Image (tube, rainbow, N blue to C red):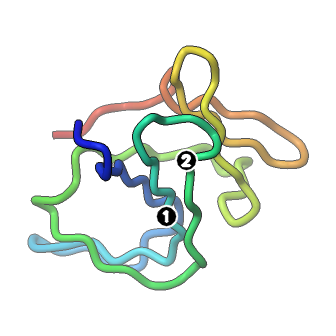
Amino acid sequence: MYKEATNHYALGELIEENDRYIKLRCKTFHFKNPMLNKGIYISDIKFRIFPWHTISYILEIPEEVNWEEALPFIDEKGEIILKTERLTYKIEENRNLWF
């Protein structure tokens, strides 16, 4: 990866889906390299359209994870953790890959 590279995660709710794209009401997390907590940038919640060809995988998180208040953290293994006031959810242990 080059120094300015970022990885992006979108966290939110599905608004629309078709063969070309999905539309989400979401916030995005931008992970700069190296992926330390200092390198996570969080966007505001807004509507976004993602063409399918730009999506690596989709993870459906449990309803009890309040995505609007969840904040991302990187643990010592480099795994992404979402934290809310009431729970901690580890993405890397729970992800289902869709290709």
Indicate left or right for 8 with 72 as reference: left
Task: Name the element at disc 1.
Answer: strand
Residue at image location 55% in from the left, 33% down from the top: 80
Where 3 sits versus 43, above or below? above
- Amino acid type at mark 1: Thr
Between 13 and 90, the residue placed more toward the observer is: 90
Q: Which mark is residue 10?
A: none
**Where residue 71 sits in the image (x, y, percent)?**
70, 51
**In front here: 24 or 72?**
72
Taking the spot 51% from the left edge, 71% from the top edge, the residue there is: 26
Q: Position of residue 65 (x, y in %)?
A: 70, 49
- What residue type is disc 2 on? Gly
Where 15 falls versus 63 (above or below)? below
| Residue furthest right as drawn | 85
Q: Secondary structure at mark 2?
A: helix
- Name the quadrant of the N terminus: top left
Q: Left of 61 or right of it: where is 3?
A: left
Near mark 2 (Cα within 10 A), the count class, few <14, some 14-19 or many ≥20, is some
Instruction: Tell me the distance, in whole angstroms, between the alpha carbons under discs 1 and 2.
Output: 13 Å
Q: Which residue is mark 1?
A: 28
Q: Quadrant of residue 90?
A: top right
Quadrant showing the C terminus: top left
Look at discs 1 and 2 and give the one toward the viewer. Answer: 2
- Position of residue 59 measured from the top left corner of the image (x, y, whole percent): 42, 43
> What residue would you read off at disc 2?
39
- Residue lying at 62% horizontally and 44% vertically, measured from the top left: 62
Height in image: 79 above or below 17?
A: above
Say whether residue 10 is left or right of residue 67: left
First in sequence, mark 1 or 2: give its number. 1
